[in-house]
Amino acid sequence: MLHDGVIVRVFRRKGQRKLLFGLIIYFMRDNCLPMMHSIIMSSPEFLAARDLNSRAERPAAVSIPVNTGNPVLDANLYDLSRRFCGTHDPDTVLQMLSTVMNAAASELGEHELEIMNTSLDELFVADKMFHPYRNVRKITCFGSARIKPEEASYRLAVDFARLAAEHGYMIITGGGPGIMQAANEGAGREKSFGLNITLPFEQHPNPVVEGSDKMMNFYYFFTRKLNLLKQTHALVAFPGGFGTMDEIFETVTLMQTGKCSIFPVVLLDPPGETFWARWVRFANKELLADKLISPEDMSLLYVSKSAEDAYNYIARFYSRFHSYYFDGKKVQLRMNTAAPQETLEWISKDFADILPENDVKQQLGDSSDPEPLLAHMPHISFTFKPGAYARLKELIDVVNDF
């Protein structure tokens, strides 16, 4: 049983109590709020759970506490985790509670605890906002907040987002002006998310998403950026400044290192303009030529000149391919439709450099799939060379195009 007042008496400092109550409310809200109905697309009916870390196993370097070393407190946390875990794994809840209590009992300053508290709250609120739409594919659009409605990039963003929304996608933006407002305008309020950042200048929610139940203000850039990537299935970048550069470089780095699931990344220039073409030339001349990146890394990016071409590139990526997950050393590719035998033979031959066991095979379902609702789908499996994620992207392209 929970001993009333024990946890609060153990931690008397204001910041410590605030962090504790924040975490307790996190689980009670999640357990008590009524379930919200999903918006389901006709195809696919169910999408794989997305995680910034696409590897299934937890790195050995990560150490998550299961206790605080205080027997009375540990007993209370154990009881709390079992009573208020809802449908979640109680051991995961216990680890989270123990982490918070260890932080609260430490010599960390109030500022550090405030960062933890605000971060947890922003992650929770964002997940609750996106949860009803978890089975709808989404596209994140990046670009400058300073681009005006009369500029070609603005009009292109409107056209692209409108086209994507007409085909069932929802659009995620940073919620501000410029390209962000253009993409939200194209998609319309009902198919738009706005992840705004609180700044003392320049950025306020644009009129399309302001007041929407799909708009939220973030205090921290890192929690905002996490959700811009975590929740999306494709990314389209329009011309932009340091922020856009940061978002593109980070996205490609996360894919290149296997910390983010692979998805299409489109660099979209208006006809007659060369913003991204010049950026790619820089990458080829300064990064690739000096062997700071590998040739296949550039396959993670696609330069486009029209809304139609950009959309078609994204749609093609999900034409046969659905999603993937790791099963030990093996990659399991889920397919919307089974691939012909010629595809498997081509993969075995053309991607031998990332297939150490040369064990490519296809089966019509996999009962061990971590997503039971996707277990019936055709699966292509093979042992994967660690780190070859750009080549994995090229392999997925072959599966779709063959």
Image (spheres, rainbow, N blue to C red):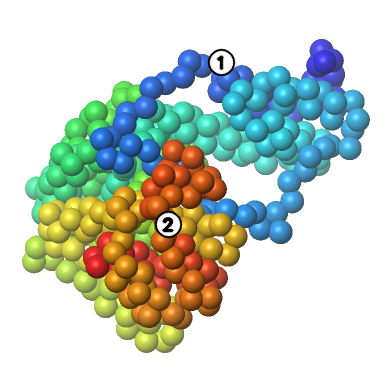
Is residue 199 or residue 374 the one in the foreground? 374
What amino acid is found at the position of numbered circle 1 in the picture?
Answer: Cys
Is residue 371 or residue 60 the one in the foreground? 371
| Relative to 146, residue 200 above or below | above
Labels 1 and 2: the sequence-earlier one: 1
User: Residue 394's x, y, as percent?
Assistant: 34, 70
- For the C terminus, which image quadrant? bottom left
- For the N terminus, which image quadrant? top right
Which residue is rendered at x = 46% and y = 33% of the image?
126
| Relative to 59, residue 43 above or below | above
Residue 51: in sight, yes or no?
no
Q: Indicate which disc residue 363 carries.
A: 2
Is residue 127 or residue 379 the one in the foreground? 379
Which residue is rendered at x = 69% and y = 31% of the image?
90
Residue extending farthest bottom: 290
Q: Indicate which disc residue 284 carries.
A: none
Q: Mark 1 points at which residue?
A: 32
Q: Residues within 10 Å of mark 1 (few under 14, many from 20)?
A: few
Residue extending farthest right: 71
Give the image quarter of residue 342.
bottom left
Q: Nearer the viewer, mark 1 or mark 2?
A: 2
Q: Are marks 1 and 2 in contact (CB under 8 Å)?
A: no
In this rendering, position of residue 247 left or right of residue 104: left
Which residue is rendered at x = 44% and y = 69% of the image?
360
Mark 1: which secondary structure? helix
Which residue is rendered at x = 62% and y = 55% of the image?
57
What amino acid is found at the position of numbered circle 2 in the picture?
Answer: Gln
User: Residue 252's x, y, as percent?
Assistant: 41, 63
Mark 2: which secondary structure? strand
What is the count of numbered marks? 2
User: Residue 308's x, y, as percent?
Assistant: 12, 54
